[in-house]
Image (spheres, helix red, strand yellow):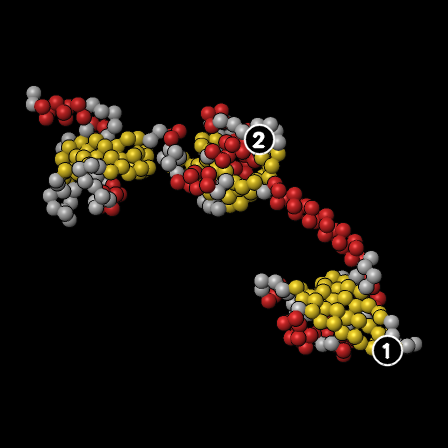
Amino acid sequence: MKQQELVFDFINTLSYPVVLVTQEQEDAEYIVSYSNQKMKNILNHKESLEPQLPSSFLEILDSHKEEIDANGIMVNNIEFSDKFYNINIIKNLNHILITFIEIEMENLFESITFKDIGSACSAMIVVLNDKGELVDANECFLAFVGIKKEEVLFKNFFQSFIPGSVEQLNQHFSKLLENDTNNNHFVTPLKDINGDGYRINWQVSKMVRQNQNFIIAVGSDISSLIEQSNNFKEKLDSIKVGFEYFPFAVGYMNSTGTFTTINKKFMKMFHIKDENAHIDFNQIPFFKKNIDFDQMSENIKLIKELSYKVKYPTKNKVLNISVDIRMLSGKKESSKLYIVVAHKIKS
């Protein structure tokens, strides 16, 4: 038996696909010169017909033709015949030898680029199969929950890490799998190995690999933001309480000149009956006559604050009223806010 035949017999017994193609000229079609039995099975090759590579794979060869040489190149995570392979391609003259190494399911996500990105930006990344089991996770997630990957693989993610009704979570998870889920956002609790709780903002997308559905979730810890928000709300509530007991008449006005919030002293001074009424600045006779919103809003642009001293006649006497208006600028014109403070001053 010739040495060449021995080599081909050996290649034919390999457990991974091998194919040799020939391209006589640069733009000529690729012709399959040899394929081992594993490759023939994938191509559904019949002895009476010449084996043909699918057009999708020929496009891969064309896209890498400038890189392929005698040293070979490796192309990772190529989906071919409902499986994923790392492909090694070597070229010698007009012959191109291609070997396929199948990627096992547990290693399918090993080379996903955003896992490295996730580590760099402290983002947690988990991959769930259609049963809700964790099939992969990056180092950020594992460090956050304080557990090793081998200890959590193929465990139910919700039962292990998300406090709450597992039945409701599974129902919601099923809806995600049924639809073309892309960039959905959810906030859920998350518990670590010690049972400590956190609040996580997840961005969730569905991905299909090997005819199976997977959910990829990228999460960030927002526990401190929620705590800060709660503290801010408490302070805001205390400000609102103080707002009512402030010794002056105070009103908050939006960019169009409408009072959105006023205290009781403001209502009393300017004879406003309904504290929930969103009344315009110029609807109040005192402001319309003595200040005028359009003139005020034009004058306040540069100095941000204006003060007025106005004589205010009543039935019994003339009062001296001080009005201070301050503008708080927003990023947009429509987000401007005016604070109007009025009080009586002695003559």
Q: Residue at x 52, y 37 (%)?
A: 173
Q: Residue at x 76, y 79 (%)?
A: 289
Question: Is residue 81 left or right of 183 when viewed as pictured?
Answer: left
Q: Residue at x 83, y 61 (%)?
A: 247
Instruction: Name the foreground residue: 139 vs 96.
Output: 139
Residue 55 image position (x, y, % from top left): 24, 43
For label 2, the crowd category at 10 Å Cα-Cα, with few meaning under 14, some 14 to 19 and many 20 or more, is some
Asked whether residue 176 appears in the rendered view, the answer is no
Question: Is residue 326 left or right of 203 when viewed as pictured?
Answer: right
Name the residue at the left extreme: 2
Asked whether residue 148 appears in the rendered view, the answer is yes
Residue 40 image position (x, y, % from top left): 21, 31
Residue 18 quadrant = top left
Q: Amino acid at mark 1?
A: Pro
Q: Amino acid at mark 2?
A: Asp
Q: Residue at x 14, y 38 (%)?
A: 92
- Point out the image quarter for the C terminus: bottom right
Question: Quick check: 333 above or below 286?
Answer: above
- Point out the image quarter for the N terminus: top left
Question: Quick check: 320 above or below 53?
Answer: below
Question: Is residue 244 left or right of 200 when viewed as pictured?
Answer: right
Reading the image, the residue beneath label 1 is: 313
What label does residue 192 carry, if any? Answer: 2
Does dot 1 land on a helix, a strand or a loop? Answer: strand
